[in-house]
Amino acid sequence: MDVRREGLRVGGLALLGVAAGAAAKWADESPVGWLGELGTYAGVWILALALVARLAPAPRAAAWRAAAFFAALAVAYYAWAEHVLGFAPGGRALALWLVVALTAAPGGAAALAWAFPRRGPVPAALVALAAGAVLADRGVVWQVWWASVLDAAPDGFRLRPVRPSPRSCSRS
């Protein structure tokens, strides 16, 4: 593997992570309900992780790429909140997401990158675990499916925001 080219790919994914983080925070503030939901549920981010892993040539590359993408995403998300929207959600939240971005995201990406080209029960279980996490999330994936297929939701299944808008929270 060419180290220079891989460095450019990692850097490109970090830039993509900055764009995704800013877009996710912007979407949180959107008056369009489902748009604000996109970044709220884990399913969207698990899909992004799986895509990073699938496009990587090896588990190590997947880990580096995922770490760069998700760390940049977290920093951009909280920077947008503070510098554009004028409120600081707190350094503890950013620290938590950076820990996740530098541990769980690279580990998950490496595991999926290892599993995708293989056959057998262990690789299948890893891929199924990621897919199941997306579907079990019962968040935006379910909501978009119900809204697009039925133009509604079944009884007892609410299309709803899961948290208050930061606009409704006190600003410090």
Image (cartoon, rainbow, N blue to C red):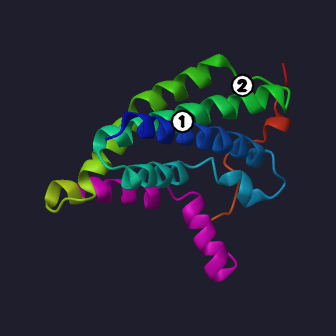
The amino acid on which the numbered mark 1 sits, given as a three-letter code, is Gly
Q: Residue at x 58, y 72 (%)?
A: 145
Kind of element beneath mark 1: helix
Q: Nearer the viewer, residue 77 or 13?
A: 13
Real-space Cα separation, disc 1 to disc 2, in angstroms: 27 Å
* Sequence-earlier tag: 1 or 2: 1
Amino acid residing under circle 2: Pro
In the picture of the structure, the residue carrying the numbered disc 2 is 89
Numbered range of the magenta stretch: 125-153
Image location (x, y in percent) of residue 153: 64, 73
Which label sits on residue 25? none
Count of numbered labels shown in the rendering: 2
47 horizontally vs 26: left or right: left
Q: Up-down: is 33 above or below 104?
A: below
Is residue 111 left or right of 38 when viewed as pictured? left
The residue located at (60%, 36%) in the rendering is: 73
Please name whichever residue, 163 or 130, is drawn nearer the observer in this view of the structure.
130
- Residue visible at 54% across and 36% down in the picture: 11
> Tag 2, which secondary structure?
loop
Question: Alpha-carbon neighbours of circle 2 within 10 Å: few (<14), some, or many (≥20)?
Answer: some
Check the picture and name the quadrant holding the C terminus: top right
> Compared to 3, does 52 lie above or below?
below
The quarter holding residue 97 reads top right
Residue at coordinates 15% horizontally, 59% vertically from top-left? 121
Q: Which residue is mark 1?
A: 11
